[in-house]
Image (cartoon, rainbow, N blue to C red):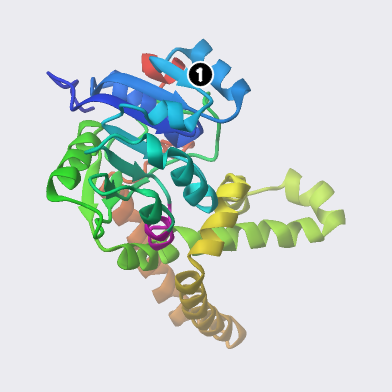
Amino acid sequence: MADALSAPLFERVAIIGMGLIGSSIARAAKHYGAASIVVAGDRDEAVCQRVRDLGFADVVTHSAAEAVAEADLVILCVPVGVMGDVAAEIGASLKPGAIVSDVGSVKNAVVEALSPHLAEGVWLVPAHPVAGTEYSGPDAGFAVLFENRWCILTPCDRSSDDAVAAVTALWRAFGSNVETMTPTHHDLVLAITSHVPHLIAYNIVGTAAHLEAVTQSEVMKFSAGGFRDFTRIASSDPTMWRDVFLHNKEAVLEMLGRFNEDLAALAKMVRWGDGDGLFDLFTRTRAIRRGIIAQGQETQAPDFGRRGPTSDPAAKA
């Protein structure tokens, strides 16, 4: 676990959107001492009241413009589809020298949505923490969600070296490994590692739902690990994933095309009884799974290591 900082990295950090990621960032900023003042913003007053009750932010407001005033760092934790609307709302309230970042799973669309609304002297450092669970809302967050996970930064022409260094320091303070790549490369990589797997999960669970007689009995009753894992993935936030697929369309379609080609080859092996081909494929894929575990990006625990540790006070906040 990362150690608490000896001094804050930022005086005032504003986080807009108090879902799983936003509330986890707020908790982490307090837990590790990364900010002197943590401001939580959410347009839903009921969510704001819940954040007040949980007590993991110093200031809570339903006004995004009010939340970002005087903030040194602003992190947008809202669906990709509303990034531009939120940027338009906060643009005039950002102080000179402020850094704006985000946590979106798509980066080209975020850069295009945010850039027009940021004044000169306001820096943009897009980011994507590759972490999460299937749960959502302010109660779902926990401070150590980002420990030993990757955070990808995608600097653009609105970034500065100092701003990128500051955002890098924040994520490293949270225990994350930080990688930098272009927005376009990020979108292609995430299409195959995250977006297409989610699309497949939604589709296979939907296929089971169409078999209504089976779904109401055998599928639920005899749900084995494979289908159970698909339902976990397919229970993720539908608004977020709708926006991901709409805003990373080209990369997702390219990866789906490659997947369909490989699926056709696999179907041919099954049809013609190619046992050697199936064994070779399953051996290679098993090695990939073991490599992911070896790199600390997964565990053998039944909950996949995605729930907050009950011993972490911030997880209970």
Stretch in magenta = 105-112
Q: Which quadrant, please, contains the C terminus?
A: top left
Q: Residue at x 58, y 88 (%)?
A: 272
Q: Position of residue 229 (x, y in %)?
A: 56, 49
Q: Which secondary structure type mostly characterizes the magenta part of the structure?
A: helix
The quarter of the picture where residue 208 lies is: bottom right
Mark 1, residues whose alpha carbon is within 10 Å: few (<14), some, or many (≥20)? many
Q: Identify the residue under disc 1.
A: 51
Q: Which quadrant, please, contains the N terminus?
A: top left
Q: Is residue 299 visible?
A: yes
Q: Is residue 22 above or below residue 179?
A: above
The quarter of the picture where residue 154 lies is: bottom left
Q: Position of residue 167 (x, y in %)?
A: 22, 40
Q: Residue at x 74, y 45 (%)?
A: 220
Q: Is residue 7 above or below residue 302?
A: above
Camera-side residue: 145 or 263? 145
Q: Residue at x 26, y 51 (%)?
A: 153
Label 1: state its secondary structure: helix
Q: Say which amino acid is labelled 1.
A: Val
Side of 291 relative to 18 (left or right): left
Camera-side residue: 257 or 268? 257
Q: Count the numbered circles shown.
A: 1
Side of 46 relative to 52 (left or right): right
The quarter of the picture where residue 189 lies is: bottom left
| 107 is within the stretch colored magenta | yes
Q: Position of residue 127 (x, y in %)?
A: 32, 48
Q: Position of residue 64 (x, y in %)?
A: 47, 32
| 81 is within the stretch colored magenta | no
Side of 26 relative to 303 (left or right): left
Q: Is residue 223 above or below residue 191?
A: above
Camera-side residue: 129 or 263? 129
